[in-house]
Image: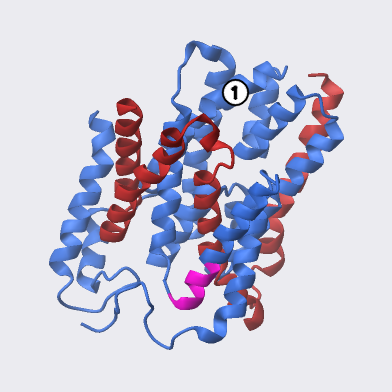
Chain colours: A blue, B red
């Protein structure tokens, strides 16, 4: 219970501080003044472990049924461990197990997973501007274990500033450690662990919702989000369940580019105007 | 699963996924991204997050098992939206979402 409430308390105190300091100074992306930014850096060091905590809790819960499903699909514990370390893709590993259970050929399974994971191209591209000035090997390493969730968390940290490829990599490794541990626990202990999967999945939905609302809400951004959402609905209605995220995001980007001409010069229709106090 | 079947799945998926994750960074690291591409990159985060949220919420066949189970995630999302708007904190949003979803699940 205490561990559940801890992030709540830290966030609440951060929020209170932010409110208190909002009155003066230069504002950052989130409306924090420079005073509070310095204060936050000193007192609540934005550490990778804190950034990774919400992801880790979700992965610990979602990784267990993934391991169980792997065993049901006839994989050994070693094979499940190898996949969780080197493939490290929740949707991919679920797909492998469920397609293998349905008796699809290995080549078909491999190509389906590869196609679904092609959405990672988008994440890597979106992180590009933030890797400027980093050594190539470190940037590549930091991109090598990005997932839907860790992309979102790292991106929001980069937008807030003071985040580097090194911290990004550490956050990813914390998240991956939770995923691997949960996969192995599921594979070894099986259904002796009961997990409320719907609840854990909704924790991830909450993260994505928060990340969505953190983005700037200019007209073109809103149209990009709407385009992505509508495309996902269309894909799922058409039966393209696993490709919906990738195709939806692509459609959203296309909508944004098409609507860029309507981007307002300053501010947005959803965000409060920020800047000089 | 047979060893050879696993090897095909394992090697192909790991190779393709790793390439998708690293190739853009490996190619463009320490090189200026062309302005036209940069403008496109702007929209990836918001489009991706909108797609991920919609993908989680929208289940085409959810209403087959009754209206309430299908509506539950949408109702649970309301407090998350409020907290996200007010605090912009991932931790608080996660806790709010889990509490709201858990309570609604427990009530139904």
Place residue A266 in its image quadrant: bottom left
Residue A165 vs residue A28: left or right? right
Locate the C terminus of chain B and report the quarter of the image it occupies.
top left
Secondary structure, magenta segment, majority class: helix
- Is residue A108 covered in magenta? no
Residue A198 vs residue A7: left or right? right
**Residue found 45% across the figure and 36% down from its top:** B67
Query: With respect to residue A240, does A262 lie above or below?
Result: below
Residue A5 vs residue A236: left or right? left
Q: Write the start and end of the magenta stretch as one range.
A: A218-224
Q: Position of residue A70 (x, y in %)?
A: 66, 22
**Residue found 55% across the figure and 24% down from its top:** A65
**Residue found 80% across the figure and 26% down from its top:** B6
Q: Position of residue A25 (x, y in %)?
A: 20, 78
Q: Residues within 10 Å of mark 1 (few under 14, many from 20)?
A: many
Query: With respect to residue B71, does B106 lie above or below?
Result: above
Q: Position of residue A95 (x, y in %)?
A: 69, 34
Q: Nearer the viewer, residue A259 or A112?
A: A259
Locate the N terminus of chain B and report the quarter of the image it occupies.
top right
Q: Nearer the viewer, residue A231 or A80?
A: A231
**Residue found 32% across the figure and 26% down from its top:** B106
How many marks can you see?
Answer: 1
Say whether residue B99 is visible: yes
Query: Label 1: which residue?
Result: A67
Place residue A210 in its image quadrant: bottom left
Place residue A99 in its image quadrant: top right
Q: Position of residue B3 (x, y in %)?
A: 83, 21
Secondary structure beneath disc 1? Answer: helix
């Amino acid at each position: 219970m205490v561990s559940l409430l801890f992030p709540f308390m830290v966030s609440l105190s951060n929020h209170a501080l932010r409110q208190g300091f909002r009155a003066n100074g230069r504002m950052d992306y989130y409306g924090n003044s420079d005073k509070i930014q310095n204060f936050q850096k000193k007192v609540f060091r934005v550490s990778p472990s804190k950034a990774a905590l919400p992801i880790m809790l979700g992965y610990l819960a979602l990784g267990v049924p993934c391991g169980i499903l792997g065993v049901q699909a006839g994989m050994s514990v070693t094979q499940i461990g190898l996949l969780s370390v080197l493939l490290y893709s929740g949707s991919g590993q679920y797909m492998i197990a469920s397609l293998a259970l349905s008796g699809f050929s290995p080549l078909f399974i491999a190509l389906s997973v590869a196609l679904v994971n092609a959405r990672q191209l988008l994440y890597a591209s979106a992180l590009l501007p933030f890797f400027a000035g980093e050594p190539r090997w470190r940037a590549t390493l930091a991109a090598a274990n990005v997932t839907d969730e860790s992309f979102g968390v790292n991106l929001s940290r980069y937008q807030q500033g003071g985040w580097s490829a090194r911290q990004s990599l550490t956050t990813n490794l914390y998240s991956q450690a939770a995923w691997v541990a949960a996969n192995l626990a599921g594979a070894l202990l099986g259904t002796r662990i009961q997990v409320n999967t719907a609840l854990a999945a909704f924790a991830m939905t909450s993260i994505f919702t928060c990340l969505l609302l953190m983005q700037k809400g200019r007209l073109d951004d809103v149209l990009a989000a709407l385009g992505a959402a509508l495309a996902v609905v269309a894909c799922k209605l058409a039966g393209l369940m696993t490709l919906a995220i990738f195709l939806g995001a692509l459609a959203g980007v296309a909508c944004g580019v098409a609507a860029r001409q309507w981007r307002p010069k300053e501010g947005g229709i959803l965000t409060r105007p920020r800047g000089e106090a | 699963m047979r060893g050879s079947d696993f090897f095909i799945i394992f090697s192909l998926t790991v190779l393709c996924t790793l390439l998708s994750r690293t190739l853009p960074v490996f190619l463009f690291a320490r090189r200026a991204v062309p302005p036209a591409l940069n403008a496109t990159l702007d929209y990836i985060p918001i489009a991706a997050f909108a797609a991920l949220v919609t993908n989680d919420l929208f289940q085409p066949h959810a209403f087959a098992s009754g209206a309430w189970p299908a509506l539950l995630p949408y109702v649970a999302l309301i407090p998350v939206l409020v907290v996200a708007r007010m605090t912009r904190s991932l931790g608080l949003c996660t806790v709010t979402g889990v509490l709201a979803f858990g309570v609604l699940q427990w009530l139904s």
